[in-house]
Every structure is written in structure tokens, then in C-alpha cells.
Image (tube, grey):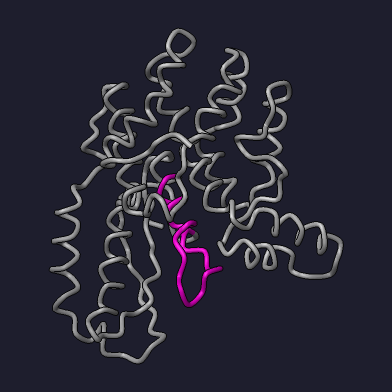
Amino acid sequence: MNEFTGSAASQADFIWKNAEDLWGDFKHTDFGKIILPFTLLRRLECALEPTREAVREAHDAFKDADVELDTILRSTAEYPFYNTSEYSLGTLGSTKTRRNLEDYIALFSDNARAIFEEFEFGNTVIRLEKAGLLYKICQNFAKIDLHPDVVPDRVMSNIYEHLIRRFGAEVNEGAEDFMTPRDIVHLATALLLDPDDALFEASPGLIRTLYDPTCGTGGFLTDAMNHVGDYGNRDKIPPVLVPHGQELEPETHAVCVAGMLIRRLESDPGRDLSKNIRQGSTLSNDL
């Protein structure tokens, strides 16, 4: 693995170095559309790595049985998503890279595969192959360790936001559309939740919903869920928070969905926290 330490900004810069390989074959305005989905793919891949072989064995054992295969594979993966392909970014090979990568993406569960459809990732793969860069980019990302134990969810959200800011700068769009400083998020969350004693006085098992109508990459939702979880260390009983959100931009929506897929409830690890994160305009099409 490449060394991957430091602040979220420096980690994002480390990932963005892949853009150096894209100069000449791609416009700088295309860089983000390549780097972001590969970052998401590597994040999902790292999360699934400890159980990948067990998932494939379960798939082979139960694929022809009269059972809820999706439920079995989620439980085996210990996440609400899974992948049954034999491939990873590091094992795609240099001769049939595109075909193997397409197979790899196709064998994600539906909720994870939809992330790459939002990025139109299939077109990106074709363009990288034509430029002779597909295998190199896959190998570059395979060397980066983005496992949740190494890069916590909030740090990963910050990395996404820094990458999006770089992408926005490249296409002359305002990065301020995407990123709320973490200190502001923490303050707003504390002001909203700290006075609500009733939120923490119920018996264990209480479920509450949390809604962000302009959720971006999900940083606000993530911080709020972390903040409420911290009350377990203060002799209070924190409720289970189920996130809901809506985001206009397909790319940032996909990032938020990926983050919520990886986030697990201790009481229900197989629950898909991404299913209520919708894409669209809150003003014109409130979902």
C-alpha cells in the first residue's frame, strides 16, 4: 500500500495525483469524473475485503437454492451491499482489463452498482481503455488503503469534499456549493440535539429519523449520527438514527449513498442506511 496519512486535504491531494496520468488524453474538466468513482470503488472494495471470499462461497453454495440469496449475502458481507466477482482493482489483469472491470462492477449488489451508474462509469472505462490508461489507473487506486478502520467515515467524507472542490475548481464551479466546514456542522448539531432531553430518555431501541434536504456528500448526516452516538458515553441512551436526505447533483448524491452503505448500525449491521438518500431538487421535486 502507498503511504496514506495526514489531513483529509493532503489525503485528497494524494488521490488527485492520479490526474497527472490523465494529462494529454483527457481535458482537465474530466478529471473529477474519473477520480471520484474510482475513489468510491476502492472505498467499497476495501470495506468488503475481509469477507469477500466468504461471500463468494456463500453465493456458490446458495445461488440455486430456494432462499433469499440477497439476505444471505448481505449477512455474510456484514454490510448491506456485497460483490460476488472474483476480481478486485488489483487483480483485473493487463490484457482484458475493461471486460474484467465491467464484470466486477456488474456483480455488485443493486444498491452499490447504482452508484457507478450515476457517474456513467461505463463510458469512463471505455475512454480510459482507448487512451491506454485503464490498467494503470486501476493499479494506482489498488495501492491506496481506504478501509473504514484506516480512514473513518467522517474523514472519508472530508476527502470526498476536497476532491469535489478540486473538481469544481477545474470546471470553474463554486466548490462552496458542496462543503460545510466541520466545526459549523458540529455546532449546529449540538445546538439542535443537546437540549432535546426526550431524545435520550426512552428505553433502548428507540428509532428516530434524521433529514437533510440538501445533504451533499452526507457530512452533516454523518456528524449528527456520530454526535448522538457519543451520548452513549454520557450515561444516556442514544436512539438509533435512520438518515434521510436529498441531493441535487448526481455525483455528490452517489458519494453520500456510498458513505451510508458503509456505515453500519451496531444493532442491525445489514440495514441499508442509503435507501432513503434520494437524488433530485428539494425545491421542485421534494421526495
Q: Compare residues 278 and 90 and report the one nearer the observer.
A: 90
- Is residue 216 found left or right of 261 in the rendered image? left
Is 140 drawn above or below residue 203 in the view shown? above
What is the x, y in percent for residue 187? 13, 61
Magenta span includes 256:
yes
Q: Quadrant of residue 221?
A: bottom left
Q: Residue furthest bottom?
A: 203
**Image position of 287 with respect to 169: above or below:** below
Furthest-top residue in this view? 24
Give the image location of residue 136, x and y in percent.
Answer: 56, 22
Judge by depth and name the residue closer to the eye, 108 or 213: 108
| Residue at image coords 38%, 42% | 252
Magenta residues, dominant SS class: loop
The residue segment tinted magenta is: 255-274
User: Which residue appears at 24% of the width and 86% of the height?
Assistant: 235
Verify whether residue 170 appears in magenta. no
Q: Where the C terminus falls, by quadrant?
A: bottom left
Looking at the image, residue 208 lies above or below residue 277 = below
Left or right: where 9 falls relative to 129: left
Which percent across, then down, holds residue 205?
A: 41, 85
Residue 115, placed above or below residue 89: below
Q: What residue lies at 33% left-to-right and 28% top-to-bottom?
A: 167
